[in-house]
Amino acid sequence: MSNYIEYDDKIAFHPGYYIKEIVEDSGLTQEDFAKRLDTTPKNLSLLIRGEQSLSIDIAMKLSRMIGTSVSYWLNLQNAYDALIAEFKSKEELAQERVIFSFLDYKYFREHFGLPDLPRKIDEQIVYVRNFLNVSTLTVLKKRDMAVNFRSATGELAEANIIKANIMVQIATNIALKTEASKFNKTLFEEAVRYALTLTKNHSTFYPLIREAFAKAGVIFVILPNISGSKINGATKKVGNNIMLMVNDRRLNSDTFWFTLFHEIGHIMNGDYGISFDAESGEQEEIADKYAENMLIPYELYRKFIEENRFDVQSISIFAKKIDRDPGIVLGRLLNDGKVAYNDWTLTSLRHKYRVKTL
């Protein structure tokens, strides 16, 4: 490692650069100079090569040995450190620009009120960084940065990882600012049963579920989706609470409730992380089974399947019997391959929820 660094039009000199000159001018070997300085030859060598910072102790010994002030040496070290930090900051900003190229600033401006800064990329980066409450956007490249990525990480591109981390970071920050009781699994089980009674409530189910879950220590957040995140939902421990997040790309009645109850299944199993598209593994299978059986009782569904009548009227009658939105039944039938996704005669059963996500 060099005892000085050049970057752009600036040069940062490590104190070791000047110590090397002093040793050479003294006519002593480094070993003899180290003995007079009351340090080891190894420490002196590391200092001269710029591989070790100048300590207060060495600064005091140098000042006594050659008649300089302690502050002279400490100021050299501080000036070097400041320039190195400036160099690293510029390099990091260049990396942040690459990460930012995967994002659309419009998402943050429209949904979270960040200022309109057309073509001012560096300023946009600063605002997004502050909004997410991270020191650098480069941390968003790290798998499991915000929460465990579970089983899908091997198939995810860097852009997917960045976007997924952003969504979890936003939801976590919301959870940190939300008042809720300490997590209580028994109370949460009661709140979940209450949520099942709201599947046919197409207008106010979200605030009602949020309130019920918060009393049990679970902070429920629906976020606007970031295109390309491939995320369905996420759960994370946040202090004494649990954050449960889903996004608004699955707000159809045939997908929303399954996604929500899938994440609830993870919480019930003490398993926290991000759920991506097309995940597999034991944890996902357990969460899927939980969602299936909570939304539609197994025995009742089995008998319904045996009747083999899946028209609008039959599905609606069965949904009324189990007190569920017909879209939930449709979603299960689609997933089980009992009806075709392109069967337009069933589209009337699929309801698109309109909720204020934030």
Image: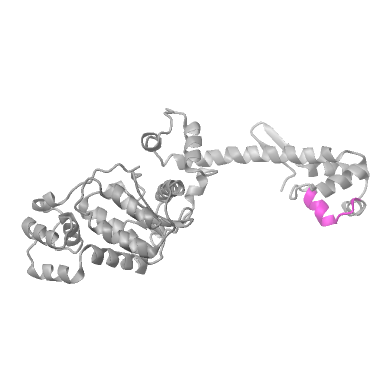
Q: Which of 233 and 8 is in front in this view?
A: 233
Prevailing secondary structure class for the magenta stretch in the rendered image: helix
Total numbered labels placed on residues in the image = 0
Q: Which of 237 and 98 is in front in this view?
A: 237
In the rendered image, which quarter is residue 115 located in? top left
**Residue 39 spot, x, y in % from top left:** 86, 54
- Quadrant of the snapshot with the C terminus: top left
Q: Can residue 220 be seen in this view?
A: yes
State the residue at coordinates (41%, 28%).
Answer: 116
In this rendering, would 284 be left or right of 13?
Answer: left
User: Within the magenta stretch, is there residue 96?
Assistant: no
Q: Give the range drawn in magenta.
A: 37-47
**Residue 244 visible in the displayed image:** no
Measuring from the top left, give residue 246's x and y in whole percent: 33, 51
Provide residue 306's location: percent of width, then percent of height: 10, 71
Q: Which of 19 and 228 is in front in this view?
A: 228
